[in-house]
Amino acid sequence: MENVLVTGGAGFIGSHFVKRILAAENVARVTVLDALTYAGHIETLGAAFLSPRLAFVHGNILDAQLVDDLMARHSMVVHFAAESHVDRSFAAASTFLSTNVTGTHTLLDAAMRHGTQRFVHVSTDEVYGPLVEGTATEESPLRPSVPYAASKAASDLIALSYFHTYGLPVCVTRSSNNYGPHQHPEKVIPRFITRLQSGEPVTIHGRGEHTRNWLHVEDNCAGIDAVLRGGTPGEVYNLGGGTDLTTRELTDHLLQICGKTWDAVTYIPDRPANDVRYSIDSSKAAAQLGYRPERRLEDGLAETADWYRRNPDRWAPLMRSPDPGGVLTASGGR
């Protein structure tokens, strides 16, 4: 029976993962370590928060003593905690470097000292940077173009260095853009849905030709779980969704789901460093771990829109934070 430490487990992807592994028979206890910043909320854990097998610790991954104390009691670590919003990284790069790089190092250092059996570092396809054509494999060079992606690329390399230098059994996952229920409304899909459902307009950067791959959060969590249980230490695994859409194509899907027309959409000049296209090859995870995304995009988007329609009490208060103006860009799916 395993004790699993999940950092950032009150965030969007982390909370879905916590609910998943709590259902596993070989998991004795799950501890969530979360700083509960603007994007982390206990409510995202739902009924899982009441499980006798779940412990919640309000704390920061930069707190070396706290991290060391927790690491001593856990055999597995899944590391989600990160600053993840691209636009915010433009104005607060130092915060992204501190949390994503130094925080990851703090965890790795403690894991090395305590002989952690498995450490999964959760990352993003944005570390590969823009690809005008072709698809990034796990062997492709890292060419991040914005502070957020650069901080994640650096944390990936630090994580892998702990395998090569110290033998710490680290795996890295890099997923495409995630979507699903409970996501913070600053992100692309929930912001679009909530504004349209409230009768507000949305705005697209550029000509809407930026391309992203979209992955339902449950499919990503299934892939991360497979890496935790069967991934080869020292390896990277791409986890893609198989559905590539331009911003205009995504917009069209969401307008139809919300019963709106293109009259609700306007265009503004593109933002700085808005990468034109991301694309990752997930065949390695498929061949080695049996990874197969199961959610159809149309079904997943409809389910997501329905959740936001039924739960305004969960997302409406978050909209009082500084509003980027309902702008729909091609990123923001973490």
Image: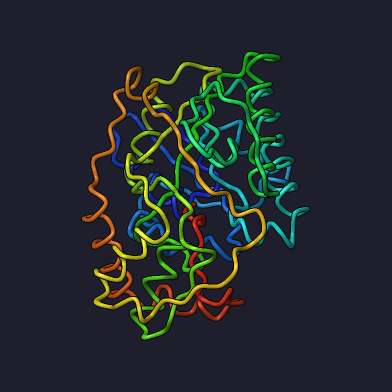
Left or right side of 54 for 243: left
Compared across the picture, whether 96 is left or right of 227 comes to: right
Q: Position of residue 222 (x, y in %)?
A: 33, 37
Say how many tags the image has. 0
How far across and how far down the image is residue 279, in percent? 46, 38
> What residue sits 24% from the left and 46% below the top?
295
52 over 317 or under it: above or below? above
Front residue (pair 265, 78): 265
Give 210 or 255, whichever is nearer the viewer: 210
34, 314: nearer the viewer: 314
Q: Position of residue 99 (x, y in %)?
A: 69, 48
Whether residue 281 is visible here, answered yes or no, is yes
Residue 226 lies in quadrant: top left
Give the quarter of the figure containing the N terminus.
Answer: top left
Q: Quadrant of residue 230?
A: top left
Outermost residue toward the bottom in this view: 199
Question: For the point 52% across and 37% down, which residue is it?
Answer: 122
Residue that appears at 37% across and 33% down: 223
For image coordinates 61% across by 48% down, the residue present is 82
Q: Residue furthest right?
A: 94
Against 233, residue 63 (above or below) is below
